Each structure stands twice: as C-alpha cells, then as structure tokens.
Image (spheres, grey):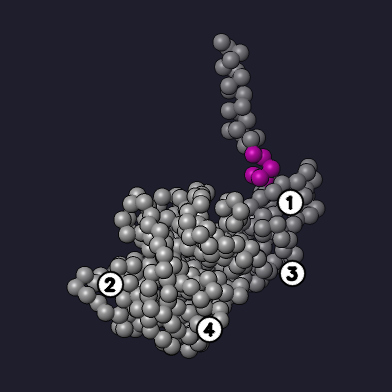
Amino acid sequence: MTKFLISLLIPLLFMACGGGDSKTALFGIDLEGGKNKFQKNQAIGIAIDNKKGKAISKVVYSIDGKELPVFSDKITLNAPKLGSRILKATVTYEDGSAEITKNIKVLSEKAPEVYTYEIVNTYPHDDKAYTQGLEFYNDTLYESTGHRGTSWLRKLDFKTGKVLNQIDLDNTFFGEGITIMNDKIYQLTWKGKTGFIYDLKEFKKVDSFQYGESKEGWGLCNDGKKIFKSDGTEKIWFLNPETLVEEGYIETVTNTSIFNRANELEYINGKIYANVYQKESMMIIDAESGAIEGVVNFGGLDKNVTKGADWNPTSNVLNGIAYHPTRKTFFVTGKNWDKLFEVTISKR
C-alpha cells in the first residue's frame, strides 16, 4: 500500500515543480503593444520572453506552416488565411528545442468596397417558397426551400416560374442551400446534420452524407474542385466532393473584425458571394483568404415585392443568389417573395 501511494505522489510532485511541461514554460511570445489583433501584411515587433535566461541560438516563427522571416525585430503577417490563427515559435536553445504558440487574429488589410445594384428584369417567384438555395445549371434554375413540411428541391423555368420537377423532403428535415457539381445536386439541411445528393439528370435522390465539425447546414457553392459550406458561424468549410469530408475552412473577416453571418453562397471567379443573414446585403469574399472585399447594398429591393398580411420583416428576408454565366447577371430573391430579380452590380 505504501509503494502504491509513493508511485502516485512522485508524478504529482514533479507536476507541482513544473516538470511536466518544462520546455514550453521556459519561453513566451511577446508582441508589440501586447496586442493580439492585426491586419494582414502588417509588420509587428516580436520577441521571445526568455523566462529562465537560456542561451537561444535560433528562433523560427510561422503561421500555418509558412515561415515568417524576422527583419529588424519585426515579422510581417502575410498569412495565407485570415481570422483566428496560431502564431508558432520554434526555439532552439542550449538544451534542445521547444515549440510555443500564441493565438492571434489576422484581419483584412483593406475595408470592403461598397457596391450597388440595378434591376434588369423581374420574374415571378412562388411566394410559398422559403428560399434557402438558388443555382443555375445551363439555363435552368434550381431552388431549395426551408421549413419542415414545406422543404423541397425544385427545377424551374426562371422566366415563368413554372415548376418543371420537384422532390419533397421528409417532414423531419428543414431544407437549406444547394450546389451542382459533376452531374450531382448537393443539398443541406439545417440542424439535421445531414445532407442529400441527387442525380442531376434523373432528378432523384441517390445518397446522403453527414456533417463533420461544422455546426449546421446553411449555404453551398463550388469552384469545380471543392464544395464550400457555410454553417452560421464565421467559418466557410471546404468539402471533398467525393467523400463530403470537411478538409479545412476559411474565416470571413473585414479589416476590423471577424464576421459570422454568411448564408446562401455563390462562387464566381475566385470569389464567394454570400447573403448576409437578415440583412439587405451580400458579401464578396476572397475564397482563399476569407477577406470580405466588398459588400453589395440591396437596400430597397424588397419594396418591389408584394407584402401580404402575413409578411414578417425578420423572416421574409433577402436570400438566394444565382449567377447566370451567359447573361453575366445575378438572380436574387427572398424568403416567400413573389418576385425573382435579375440584377447587375457595380461599385458605388
């Protein structure tokens, strides 16, 4: 019994003396001004807090595996991805080496540019459609809707609003965003942690998939190689189109903060266009870094919509973005709106 107690006390004694994590306890990372929030490509003063006076022979700083060279005791934060990042210092000293980290936020280096819109055409839209996803394939419009009991996937003639085909979701699911890739339609559900896959030509469900770390299902788009997924947080996830496994993410940021309201998504030439949930605006996001480079102000668009007695300004909001590559215009609508708008956008 005595030997057993001694065997328990010895490791506890070492932990109390700091022996359990001695290398990382030797050093810390000091940043200029004690700050932890910076802009991309900002040069900041940096130093190692040498707590025990060890002889340091080399220090290498990095973010996401990319080395950040030191010039005049400063590093430049040219991180490939923005948002919450981990700054790592690999310290070589007299007895070995140690890796220490510091959590920082890397924001965009420029404020978003402001865009406005012009209505080119107006088309009919089913006001029973609680629009969640909108996407063109060739000249045909596909739409996904929400609410349990009225969630469906539709194939539409956008000019007339005529429903060409429809698949109803089970009443237990709340439909969300869609995207089309490799002759398949991918559809999210909101809190069900489940997505569905449909054969584009046959227009029938062929498979389903489960979410990984992402919180919920909101919007989808793709760049022809990977699928992007929003989940109601600041993250836009990368999904492998074959396995639907989440293989990383970007965080959406401005020059002042991390932003978390990206909803329905559309990908065009390296940019992700995202509805801002419950706002009359659309973000233009760099698909590699997460920088919000522009904001489209759709203020006043809903004045063209017929608002019945059941209209609710907090739920019947702008939602749904589809880009028509031949016409080079955007098609936008809202939840339970009776119109679909074809618009162009330009810098204000």
The correct choice, above or below, for 266 with respect to 229 in the image is below
Amino acid, disc 1: Val
**Main secondary structure found in the magenta portion:** helix
Q: Dot 1: few (<14), some (14–19), or many (≥20) neighbours within 10 Å? A: many
Are the residues flagged by discs 3 and 4 in contact, CB closer than 8 Å?
no
Going from the N terminus, do you reach mark 1 or mark 4 first?
Answer: 1
Q: Secondary structure at mark 4?
A: loop
Image location (x, y in percent) of residue 66: 71, 60
Reading the image, the residue beneath label 1 is 91
Reading the image, the residue beneath label 4 is 327
- Mark 3 or 1: in front is 1
Image location (x, y in percent) of residue 68: 72, 63
Q: From mark 3 to mark 1, how far is it between C-alphas?
A: 18 Å
Q: Dot 4: few (<14), some (14–19), or many (≥20) neighbours within 10 Å? A: few
Q: From mark 3 to mark 4, how far is it between C-alphas?
A: 52 Å
Going from the N terminus, do you reach mark 2 or mark 4 first?
Answer: 2
At 31% across and 76% down in the image, what residue appears? Answer: 338
Going from the N terminus, do you reach mark 3 or mark 1 first?
Answer: 3
Q: Is residue 199 left or right of residue 17?
A: left
Q: From mark 2 to mark 3, how far is it between C-alphas?
A: 55 Å
Reading the image, the residue beneath label 2 is 313
Amino acid, disc 4: Arg
Residue 256 visible (yes or no):
no
